[in-house]
């Protein structure tokens, strides 16, 4: 068999094999982000009308450090607005749910609407992936997304006294934690997982 006759190693082929063998995506999160992620860009016109566009992920220098920091056990992000940090986290949680069997990512936000909005961003990214990179969803609701096959799960909760309890998550995001009524109680509930 000549080299030309061998299977062309495309991303589609590699990802199909990765999912079949339950392996991590070999090209990594940054490649996934730069190659496959589309996000929603909302702007307001001079007349006050909202303009919504779907745009490809745009890499900015601030993202270099943030992507490296995502490997930390505990990460507090103090950020400026409009630098796509919430979209980067949406892509990160989706990436891990897609390529890590039984992965659990929990979002705790100020209220259920805010938590659902964070999850909606991951869902938006999923909906705009190439079809061959969408293995299907076994659960698809405003507050939970479960990837068929890997059972990777993203759940969204409001900051209640019980948020984060009874779950052993791989990653917990306390979105806008300064505005959580029960931030200290929630942190006490999930900090043993961070300290492990």
Image: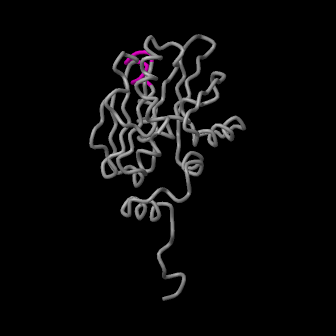
Is residue 26 one of those drawn in magenta? no
Question: Which of the two residues, 86 or 65, is positioned nearer the viewer here?
Answer: 65
Where residue 145 appears, as percent x and y from the top left, is: 34, 37
Residue 134 lies, with reference to residue 175, above or below; the image says below
Residue 36 lies, with reference to residue 195, above or below; the image says below
Q: How is the image coloured?
A: one colour
In the rendered image, the residue lying farthest to the right is 61
- State the count of labels: 0
Using residue 159 as the reference point, say whether residue 5 is left or right of it. right
Where residue 71 appears, as percent x and y from the top left, is: 58, 43
Residue shown at the point (52%, 48%) measured from the top left: 36
Where residue 101 appears, as percent x and y from the top left, is: 37, 51
Using residue 21 as the reference point, say whether residue 31 is left or right of it. right
Residue 177 lies, with reference to residue 93, above or below; the image says above
Residue shown at the point (47%, 64%) measured from the top left: 14
In the rendered image, the residue lying farthest to the left is 138
- Please tell me in which quadrant of the rendered image residue 105 appears: top left
Using residue 24 as the reference point, say whether residue 41 is left or right of it. right
Is residue 113 one of those drawn in magenta? yes
Where residue 151 appears, as percent x and y from the top left, is: 32, 46
Question: Which of the two residues, 184 or 31, is positioned nearer the viewer here?
Answer: 184
Magenta residues, dominant SS class: helix
Magenta span of residues: 110-117
């Amino acid at each position: 068999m000549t080299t030309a006759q061998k299977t062309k190693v495309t991303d589609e082929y590699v990802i199909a094999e990765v999912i079949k063998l339950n392996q991590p995506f070999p090209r990594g999160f940054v490649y996934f982000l730069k190659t496959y992620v589309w996000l929603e860009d909302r702007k307001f016109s001079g007349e006050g009308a909202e303009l919504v566009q779907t745009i490809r992920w745009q890499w900015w220098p601030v993202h270099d450090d943030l992507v490296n920091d995502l490997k930390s056990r505990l990460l507090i992000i103090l950020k400026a607005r409009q630098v796509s940090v919430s979209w980067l986290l949406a892509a990160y949680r989706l990436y891990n749910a897609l390529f890590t069997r039984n992965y659990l990512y929990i979002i705790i936000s100020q209220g259920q609407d805010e938590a659902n909005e964070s999850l909606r961003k991951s869902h938006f990214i999923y909906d705009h992936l190439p079809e061959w990179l969408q293995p299907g969803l076994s659960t698809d609701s405003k507050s939970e997304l479960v990837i068929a096959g890997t059972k990777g799960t993203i759940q969204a909760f409001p900051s209640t006294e019980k948020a984060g309890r009874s779950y052993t998550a791989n990653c917990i995001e306390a979105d806008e934690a300064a505005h959580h009524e029960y931030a200290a109680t929630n942190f006490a509930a999930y900090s043993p997982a961070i300290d492990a």
